[in-house]
Image: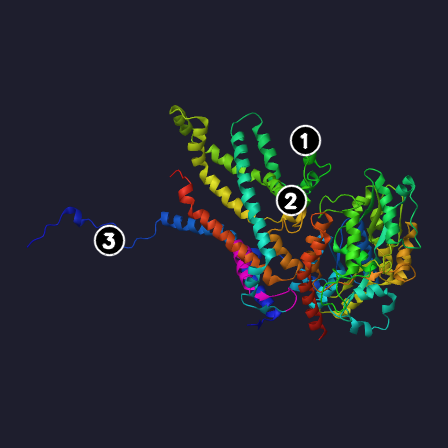
């Protein structure tokens, strides 16, 4: 029996019982006005440097819109849970930052407002100024649900000092290395004790860059089943797996939770780091010389994962007009200039890209890759149930990188459940499309 | 026939309603009613807190467990479908087994450690207050901080534990990524973190044991072990019962350390029930299923605790 209960009635019931029950305990306490009733925006922020960027954002927004907006900052780790609960209780800010990997999940559940009508009705808004990858990340089922904040491909950092010390030739910033060249270059460093050739996190996020570059994918072409067991995907995963288990080019994994490729690289004894340009700011404190080069090219080319984030309007926002103005201000060229010039990440707008400047000397390759002038990239395609899929792939797959089971066995063990989850995603896609 | 009435019968009986005349309430009665009211007023905040933060969530969880609800869109009533799913969910049962493993290993170890330390502290040596405070520190420290310190201690290559083990010729394992050692690693850390609570309760219990009992036992020629077995343990059993009940309940709810130190891995070796509930609710947006899991956990803890209380009369010795 399927009895439909409206969300409103559910919330009313919760509100009524909650109010009665909590009256006694909360009597005398004043409550602040609902966050949604003012020009407020939410963002993740960890540390004083990030807080400063968002303070500058707020000052810019306030002076542009001539308002006194409220920036609700939450440490990145707790941001999503807090945002989920705010969405469920209708207490979100008017505009909220959303990670690109969560946009399909929120959009499919009707939690975000589609922006296409607002975009159409606003001739001053130039959607083409946003990188194509950013527009794709912010869309779901051909509808726009967010405006980009940042977008960037995965790149390869290298420790210049270590290369010079060991006399290994520096990689080219113009021509991506082949996998064979990369393997040989990384392997050259392992001749010295406690020096490693490469570091990345052994999870699906980092593996996807190799899988795309091999011509593989997470989903099959009609998005009905997993493509991780395809020949191309297996080739890519085997290549990375061997770097960990067979060749021992990577530092040993001591903890799957705190395994941090960046901190490994910052030790100064690792030649290459796979990561995004959002780490540039952290690496500027490194005690060695370093630079960036494009991601190595596999059988299908250099196609690293391109990921990003954006700002969106929660579906239940009452004042859509003000929310749209706020959203435009937060993703305007001037605002993204503040973000990029602070070195946080490559901005989602092409016109703001000039603010994301060196060091390192080769930082410009990020924009060249996004513009299609150098190497290449692949938008990080995620599902409407990405959380579940990511969680499933976080169990057996990392075990194979620890050498506890073979890669083939790991893929075999998770494939049935992965196919079921992808099937659920496919059904959601069909339902939301209709 | 005349009936003889004794003088005693002429005196009205105190509790005979027929002979009782209403009397104005005395000061004593007023005071008693006042005391009752005061007690209720003192209990009220706690009772309201229980209603809002315990009873209401349990009832709400029972209701939500019958729904399919992703937190954002309208919920759908699905009856017992979530409970049916639980029966065949290997992940749920794996987390159930992991939690049971954690509980049945960590609770006895914590209690033994607490008892030993309480017995030592009860000896009354110099600077005992300092030692007592130091030993209570792990319990008073928040789990997140402790977990991060233990992550560092468990580093295989140059972590503190493996370094110490290497001094005695033992090659330590890759603690937190080992399929065999990840759960014991969590248990060791949890015992270290939790023994302070039991230790303080036991110490209070030990100090309440009348000294005459030991003296009498010594007069009878009882050895130290006999005194411990026949005097200390029985007299300490109410404290022991309290510590066992609260530790079992706490252990079934283990979450923080597993999330921070291993995130349930490697594989699902350290995934606990509460972690499984958290993931279902906040990562997979399956609120109905999360509520069903939490209800099963609640019922399981209820049954275990009820069984402990039923056995209380047999195992626990009360003075009176």
Residue topped by disc 2? B182
Q: Residue at x 61, y 42 (%)?
A: B184
Looking at the rendered structure, whether the residues under marks 2 and 1 are on a common chain is answered as yes
Instruction: State the separation of the CA atoms marked 3 and 1.
Output: 86 Å
- Residue indicated by mark 1: B169
Q: Chain of mark 2?
A: B
Magenta segment = B48-73
2 and 1 marks in contact (CB < 8 Å): no
Q: Residues within 10 Å of mark 3 (few under 14, many from 20)?
A: few
x, y percentage for residue B55? Answer: 52, 57
Give the position of the N terminus of chain A as an image quadrant.
bottom right
Chain of residue at mark 3: B
Q: Are marks 3 and 1 in contact (CB under 8 Å)?
A: no
Quadrant of image for the C terminus of chain A: bottom right
* Mark toward the start of the polypeptide (2 vs 3): 3
Based on the picture, tell me whether residue B68 belongs to the magenta stretch: yes
Q: Closest to the observer: A328 or A268? A: A268
Tell whether position A348 is magenta. Answer: no
Image disc number at residue B16: 3
Subunit of mark 1?
Answer: B
Name the quadrant containing residue A429.
Answer: bottom right
Q: Main secondary structure of the magenta part?
A: helix
Q: Quadrant of residue B238?
A: top left
- Mark 3 or mark 1, whichever is nearer to me: 1
What is the secondary structure assignment of the residue under circle 3? loop
First in sequence: mark 2 vs mark 1: 1
Q: How far separated are the C-alphas under marks 2 and 3?
A: 73 Å
Q: Which sits earlier in the primary sequence, circle 3 or circle 1?
A: 3
Same chain under badges 3 and 1? The reply is: yes
Q: State the mark number for residue B80.
A: none
Q: Which circle, 2 or 3, is nearer the viewer? A: 2
């Amino acid at each position: 029996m399927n009895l439909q209960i409206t969300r409103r009635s559910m919330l009313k019931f919760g509100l009524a019982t909650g109010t009665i029950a909590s009256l006694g305990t909360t009597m005398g306490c004043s409550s602040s006005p609902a966050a949604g009733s003012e020009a407020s925006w939410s963002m993740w922020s960890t540390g004083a440097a990030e807080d400063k960027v968002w303070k500058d954002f707020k000052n810019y927004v306030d002076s542009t819109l001539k308002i006194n907006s409220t920036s609700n900052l939450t440490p990145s780790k707790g941001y999503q849970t807090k945002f989920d609960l705010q969405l469920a209780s209708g207490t979100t800010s008017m505009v909220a930052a959303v990670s690109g990997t969560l946009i399909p999940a929120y959009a499919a559940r009707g939690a975000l407002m589609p922006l296409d009508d607002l975009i159409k009705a606003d001739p001053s808004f130039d959607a083409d100024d946003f990188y194509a990858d950013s527009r794709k990340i912010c869309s779901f089922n051909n509808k726009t649900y967010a405006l980009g904040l940042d977008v960037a491909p995965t790149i390869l950092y290298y420790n210049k000092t270590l290369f010079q010390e060991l006399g290994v030739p520096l990689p080219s910033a113009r021509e991506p290395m082949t996998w064979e060249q990369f393997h040989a270059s990384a392997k050259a460093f392992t001749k010295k004790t406690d020096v490693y050739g490469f570091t990345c996190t052994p999870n699906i996020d980092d593996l996807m860059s190799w899988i795309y570059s091999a011509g593989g994918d997470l989903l099959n072409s009609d998005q009905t089943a997993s493509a991780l067991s395809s020949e191309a995907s297996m080739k890519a995963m085997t290549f990375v797996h061997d770097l960990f288990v067979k060749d021992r080019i990577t530092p040993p994994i001591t903890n799957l939770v705190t395994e941090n490729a960046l901190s490994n690289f910052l030790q100064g004894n690792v030649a290459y780091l796979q990561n995004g340009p959002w780490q540039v700011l952290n690496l500027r404190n490194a005690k060695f010389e370093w630079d960036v080069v494009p991601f190595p090219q596999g059988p299908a080319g250099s196609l690293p994962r391109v990921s990003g984030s954006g700002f969106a309007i929660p579906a239940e926002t009452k004042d859509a007009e003000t929310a749209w103005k706020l959203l435009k201000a937060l993703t305007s060229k001037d605002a993204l200039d503040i973000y990029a010039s602070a070195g946080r990440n490559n901005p989602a707008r092409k016109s703001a890209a000039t603010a994301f400047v060196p060091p390192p000397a080769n930082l410009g390759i990020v924009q060249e890759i996004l513009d299609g002038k150098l190497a290449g990239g692949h938008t990080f395609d995620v599902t409407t149930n990405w959380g579940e899929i990511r969680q499933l792939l976080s169990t057996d797959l990392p075990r194979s990188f620890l050498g506890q089971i073979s890669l083939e066995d790991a893929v075999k063990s998770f494939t049935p459940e992965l196919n079921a989850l992808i099937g659920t995603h496919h059904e959601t896609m069909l339902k939301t499309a209709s | 026939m005349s009936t003889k009435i004794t003088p005693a019968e002429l005196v009205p009986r105190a509790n005979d309603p027929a002979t009782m005349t209403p009397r104005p309430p005395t000061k004593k009665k007023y005071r008693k009613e006042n005391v009752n009211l005061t007690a209720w007023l003192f209990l009220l905040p706690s009772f309201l807190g229980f209603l809002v933060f315990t009873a209401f969530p349990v009832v709400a969880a029972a209701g939500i467990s019958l729904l399919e609800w992703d937190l954002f869109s309208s919920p759908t009533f699905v009856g017992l479908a979530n409970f049916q799913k639980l029966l065949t969910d290997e992940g749920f049962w794996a987390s159930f087994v992991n939690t049971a493993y954690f509980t049945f290993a960590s609770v006895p170890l914590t209690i033994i450690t607490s008892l030993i330390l309480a017995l030592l502290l009860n000896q009354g040596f110099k600077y005992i207050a300092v030692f007592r405070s130091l030993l209570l520190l792990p319990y008073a420290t928040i789990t997140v901080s402790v977990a991060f310190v233990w992550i560092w201690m468990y580093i295989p290559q140059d972590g503190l534990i493996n370094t110490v083990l290497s001094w005695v010729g033992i090659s330590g394992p890759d603690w937190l990524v080992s399929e065999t050692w990840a759960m014991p690693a969590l248990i060791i850390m949890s015992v270290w973190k939790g023994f302070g609570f039991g230790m303080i309760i036991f110490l209070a219990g030990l100090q309440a044991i009348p000294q005459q009992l030991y003296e009498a036992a010594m007069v009878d020629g009882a050895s130290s072990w006999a005194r411990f077995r026949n005097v200390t343990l029985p007299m300490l059993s109410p404290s022991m019962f309290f510590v066992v009940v609260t530790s079992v309940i706490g252990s079934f709810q283990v979450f923080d350390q597993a999330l921070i130190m291993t995130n349930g891995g490697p594989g699902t070796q350290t995934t606990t029930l509460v972690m499984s509930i958290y993931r279902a609710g906040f990562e997979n947006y399956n609120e109905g299923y999360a509520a069903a899991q939490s209800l099963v956990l609640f019922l399981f803890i209820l049954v275990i605790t009820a069984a402990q209380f039923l056995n209380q009369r047999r195992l626990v010795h009360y003075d009176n």
